[in-house]
Amino acid sequence: AEGPNAFDCSGLTQFVYQQIGIDLPRRAISQSKVGDPAGKRLQRGDLLFFSTDARQSLVTHVGLYEGNGVMIDASKSHGRVRRDNLDERYWVERFMFARRLNGGVDVDEFKADRGF
């Protein structure tokens, strides 16, 4: 689901970045290859990549870092855009790495413009 009425994880991140003129590939695994490593200090707008496969070696989920340990993401199983705490065990165990594109996205501005 590529939005704007329904999203999966990579459709959401693709949509958000498209709103500021940055084209991202459609799939999470492809998105994981763009930009630069974010390092240890996350910034708003960083793309966060997770692995939910059995060996936890393949990127299967992507979210957008909001700040203060919170990620904005979407999933088909939950059927909506949501906020997740990155301190939750589920995410801690599955986190792989983060990438940064053009210094990040102003998430507050994006949400306000879209009524989130």
Image: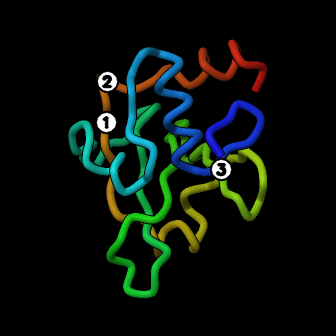
- Left-right relation of 41 to 69: left
**Residue located at (61% from left, 43% from top):** 72
Q: Are discs 2 and 1 less than 8 Å apart at CB?
A: yes
* C-alpha distance separating marks 2 and 1: 6 Å
Please rate how many residues cluster around mark 3, counting C-alpha atoms within 10 Å: few if below 14, some from 14 to 19, many from 20.
many
Q: Residue 74 got which mark?
A: 3
Residue 40 locus on image (x, y percent)? 28, 49
Q: Amino acid at mark 2?
A: Gly
Q: Is residue 96 above or below residue 84?
A: below
Please rate how many residues cluster around mark 1, counting C-alpha atoms within 10 Å: few if below 14, some from 14 to 19, many from 20.
many
In the rendered structure, which disc, 2 or 3, sits on the residue that comes first in sequence?
Answer: 3
* C-alpha distance separating marks 1 and 3: 19 Å
Closer to the camera in the image, 71 or 113: 113
In the rendered structure, which disc, 1 or 3, sits on the residue that comes first in sequence?
Answer: 3
Q: Residue 103 got which mark?
A: 2
Residue 108 locus on image (x, y percent)? 61, 21
- Residue placed under numbered mark 1 in the picture: 100
Q: Amino acid at mark 3?
A: Ala
Residue 21 locus on image (x, y percent)? 42, 15
